[in-house]
Amino acid sequence: MSKQHKYRRLEQASPEEITALTDMVNQCSWRQTFHIQPVTGLLNDPNGFSYYGGEYHLFYQWFPLGTYHGLKYWYHTKSKDLAFWHNEGIAIRPYDRFDSHGAYSGSAIEKDEKLYIMYTGNTRDKEWKRHPYQCLAVMDESGEITKRGTPLIDHVPAGYTEHLRDPKVWEDKDMYRCVIGAQRQNLTGAAVIYESPDLIEWHFRGEIKTKLDDFGYMWECPDYFELDGKGVLIFSPQGLSPEGDKYQNIFQSGYVIGKPLNRNTMEFEHGDFEELDCGFDFYAPQSMLDGKGRRLLVAWMGQAEVDYPTDSHGWAHCLTIPRELKLHNGQLIQQPVEELQKLRGESVTAECMITDEHRTLEGITGTAYEMICEFSALEAAAVGVVIRAGQSEQTVIRYDHGIQKVTFDRSASGEPSGVKYGTTRSCKLDADYIKLHLFVDTSSVELFINDGEKVFTSRIFPQPDSEGIRFFTEEGSAHLKVTKWDLAKAVD
């Protein structure tokens, strides 16, 4: 693909092209019901997740004219309640010398009754070499966004390559700080810290000193915060090799937890790296602290360099539902925000014993729903649920009690996606009681196990009439309790 085509601007497309693309997108049978998704083209990283002016604001990377990673804009959507979202349109256009080849990822923070947006401006010189800038745009109470005419940070610190991006800013006790993803000159990933008294003048403080000196070739979308007295660093390392059930996707996202970051020495004492999500499609998570004191997180429900069936329909990807982060037994757990209960419509509840069988329950079918199923009195070798089942399609979630492992199987989930990286994902889970909390949309599944102890996020692409749900046990019995709610359309 030529550079001219890849970096086309929105105004270079004719009205007829935009109309045809929009019509094709709207006719796609895999359009989501309650997830944020692009009106056309490609969505990727969530950006600027914040609470400002009595509303939640969420921006995302957007290329409007195709499903490849072309010229990136920021698109804006907002919500009063984290359940229903309204599209506001383009927030940042990549028109200036410091973001000429894309307005890349960043974050937002309120100051002086305005929302300060810090992002990476991507540029290329005549030799096509990358030159990143850390930039500022400011949104006022009316929603108008104005770029600052010069970058905040106009060069890469010594010892690092031009892969410096994705600033995540926060207000600390003594000053503002931001963490930025970086690549060392020896081509290993890292995260660096800058400090500012006013969000305008920034000074390089150094690298966060971790024990992960050779852990992938680039750390994208870093995010540092403190929760219950612990320091947490979330980041997306690129270049990890698979290890058993871990690191199975092309790129990973996870976290380390430890003592709070030492602001003087930049030392961060922490435990092992843990993946945030065990599924197929989860990357570039970003968190924020809301007005209720909750640490909330949203991620891109997708992966780079992977083809998706919606590509041929003119759009790609969506964002996850908002989740609340909590610390439990030294691990981060994710739980759907309680506001999502506003989407609930009609409910159906059932309770029974099942033994060595696959069972359907009256009234429990669907393509866009929330469902909680609990397996107790567990005396079976395996239990689970089959969703989006049709004549030849099914998505299977299975817990093998004997080997203490959960498996998500999308080998027969419809049109394939990312088969190069396998069709199953698994993780260890030691439990005698299994609670599966599912958010199933037209073309996705978000699964929270045992109140967020494990999470699987995955896209699936079945036919519209594949709406069956079955529950099963193998080699024994279990008590099953199920509640299912149909969910309302949540994004305009």
Image (cartoon, rainbow, N blue to C red):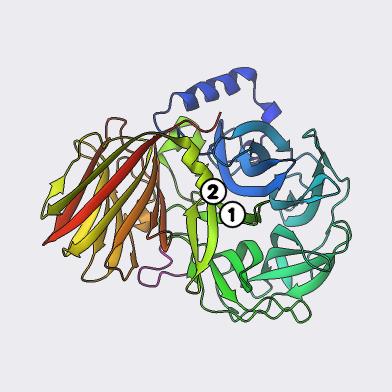
174 or 318: nearer the viewer: 174
Please identify the residue farthest to the top as the structure is shown: 16
Q: Taking 166 as reference, is 340 left or right?
A: left
Magenta part of the protein: which range? 238-248
Q: Residue at x 24, y 60 (%)?
A: 376
282 or 316: nearer the viewer: 282
Residue type indicated by callout 2: Pro
Q: Position of residue 316 (x, y in %)?
A: 50, 39
Q: Position of residue 453 (x, y in %)?
A: 42, 64
Q: Which residue is mark 2?
A: 322
Which image quarter: residue 91? top right
Q: Residue at x 33, y 41 (%)?
A: 484
Tell how many labels. Answer: 2
Q: Which residue is mark 1?
A: 296
208 or 149: nearer the viewer: 208
Residue 13 visible in the current orientation: yes
Q: Position of residue 348 (x, y in %)?
A: 30, 37
Residue type indicated by callout 1: Leu
Q: Which mark is residue 255?
A: none
Q: Residue at x 24, y 54 (%)?
A: 384
